[in-house]
């Protein structure tokens, strides 16, 4: 338990997919004047260094955000432009030293005057402390609350939000396999409490039965609840060359995650068109070998 640290993975291809979809969703939901409540059940540390030991050891941002930043030809695609703007917003100057996690990319789009709210949950003691320190630096920190509590459980008491407008990001680390079942149970319970909320679930595409079955279970759940859904995946494919150590003498690096998905219940009606334009461009830049691909499907 708690061996997962998002700092190793910040800005990788999975974060690119997750945060791009998240921004497109929040941007749409904040077009209406009524207050929006956003809940991030597994918030992480909020802000990550791209030049510290975690990032350097994994080298994952090099195959995600850093590759995208270098690919100027796709920067005009609106969803990619919005995503890159969110990353640039936490950096001063041209060099990218910091990467914003979900709390920051969400908060950037919330409105103080509309009384939007962001509720963050993070259980890891170190990450919860770092998250609190990072949020304390925000001018708009009053709209954000942080609790070192179980996000799955804590969500229950927040639904439905007073304004009846809400977005929930469910982004566990899946380091224990019970997380897969918890995601399904959490979504099922949440839809009973707040049927019109928008729910975004991130998941890894890995050769594990629970991971393989998760999107199918989520589709069944959304269909039974008669709710529209959107499912987007991005696979950068296998590496063609062996994973070299970053420094001479270091142990070879593990290949790492090559694919992930986002499943959205009650997505904005514009999201499919937005992603249909952006996903092929993301793949063209981030795809690296055998098995690369992207999918986009909707239902309900
Ligand atoms: N959402 C973050 C982002 O996109 O920047 C990344 C979150 S990371 C994938 C998952 C986080 O959930 C880890 O920081 C982990 O410590 C935390 N965590 C694990 N179990 C939890 C639980 N039951 N409730 C809240 N947080 C939990």
Image (cartoon, rainbow, N blue to C red):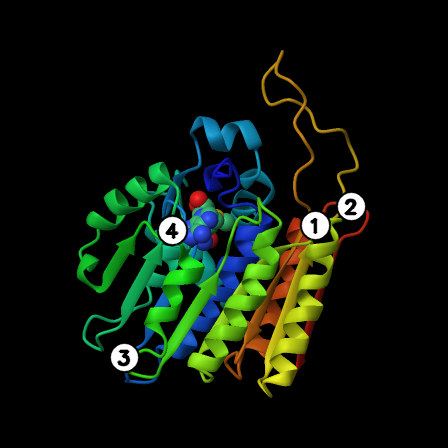
Tell which tag, 3 or 1, sits nearer the viewer.
3
Q: Looking at this view, is 132 or 2 the one in front?
A: 2
Whether pointer 4 and pointer 3 mark residues with C-beta atoms closer than 8 Å, the reply is no
> In terms of secondary structure, where does tag 1 sit?
loop
Whether pointer 2 and pointer 1 mark residues with C-beta atoms closer than 8 Å, the reply is yes
Q: Is residue 268 above or below residue 175?
A: below
> In terms of secondary structure, where does tag 4 sit?
helix
Q: Earlier in the sequence, mark 1 or mark 4?
A: 4
Calculate the distance from the C-alpha at mark 3 to the C-alpha at mark 2: 44 Å
| Residue bearing mark 2 | 289
Q: Does residue 139 appear in the picture of this structure?
A: yes
State yes or no: Cβ of the residue under disc 1 lies below 8 Å from any atom of ligand 1. no
**x, y percent for residue 160:** 36, 79
Q: Is residue 138 left or right of residue 168?
A: left
Q: Is residue 290 left or right of residue 216?
A: right
| Residue bearing mark 1 | 236
Q: Earlier in the sequence, mark 4 or mark 3?
A: 3
Q: Looking at this view, is 77 or 247 the one in front?
A: 247
Tell which tag, 4 or 3, sits nearer the viewer.
3
Q: Does residue 101 appear in the picture of this structure?
A: no
Q: Is residue 268 left or right of residue 35?
A: right
Q: Earlier in the sequence, mark 4 or mark 2?
A: 4
In the image, what residue occupies the spot 59% across and 70% down?
Answer: 275
**x, y percent for residue 98:** 38, 41
Disc 2 crowd, CA 10 A, few/some/many (<14, 14-19, 20+): some
Q: Earlier in the sequence, mark 3 or mark 2?
A: 3
Q: Earlier in the sequence, mark 2 or mark 1?
A: 1
Calculate the distance from the C-alpha at mark 2 to the C-alpha at mark 1: 7 Å
In the image, what residue occupies the spot 30% across and 40% down?
Answer: 130
| Residue bearing mark 4 | 88
Calculate the distance from the C-alpha at mark 4 to the C-alpha at mark 2: 28 Å
**x, y percent for residue 28:** 42, 77
């Amino acid at each position: 338990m708690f061996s997962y640290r998002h700092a190793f993975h910040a800005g990788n291809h999975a974060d690119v997919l997750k945060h791009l979809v998240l921004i497109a969703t929040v941007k749409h939901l904040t077009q209406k004047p009524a207050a929006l409540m956003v809940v991030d059940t597994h918030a992480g540390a909020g802000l990550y260094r791209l030049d510290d030991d975690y990032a350097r050891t994994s080298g994952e941002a090099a195959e995600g955000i850093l590759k995208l930043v270098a690919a100027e030809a796709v920067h005009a695609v609106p969803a990619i432009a919005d995503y890159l703007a969110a990353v640039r917003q936490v950096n001063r100057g041209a060099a990218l030293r910091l990467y914003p996690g979900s709390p920051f990319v969400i908060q950037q789009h919330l409105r103080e005057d509309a009384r939007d709210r962001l509720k963050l949950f993070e259980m890891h003691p170190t990450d919860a402390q770092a998250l609190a320190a990072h949020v304390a630096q925000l001018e708009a920190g009053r709209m954000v609350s942080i609790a070192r509590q179980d996000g799955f459980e804590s969500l229950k008491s927040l639904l439905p939000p007073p304004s009846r407008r809400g977005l929930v990001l469910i982004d566990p680390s899946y380091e224990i396999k019970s997380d897969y079942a918890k995601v399904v149970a959490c979504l099922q319970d949440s839809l009973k409490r707040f049927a019109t909320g928008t729910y975004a679930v991130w998941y890894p595409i890995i050769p594990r039965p629970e991971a393989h079955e998760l999107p199918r279970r989520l589709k069944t759940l959304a269909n039974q609840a008669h709710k529209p859904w959107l499912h987007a995946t991005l696979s950068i494919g296998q590496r063609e060359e062996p994973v070299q150590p970053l420094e001479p003498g270091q142990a070879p690096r593990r290949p790492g995650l090559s694919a992930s998905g986002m499943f959205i219940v009650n997505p904005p009606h514009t999201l499919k068109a937005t992603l249909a334009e952006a996903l092929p461009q993301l793949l063209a830049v981030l795809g690296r070998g055998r098995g690369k691909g992207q999918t986009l499907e909707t239902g309900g």
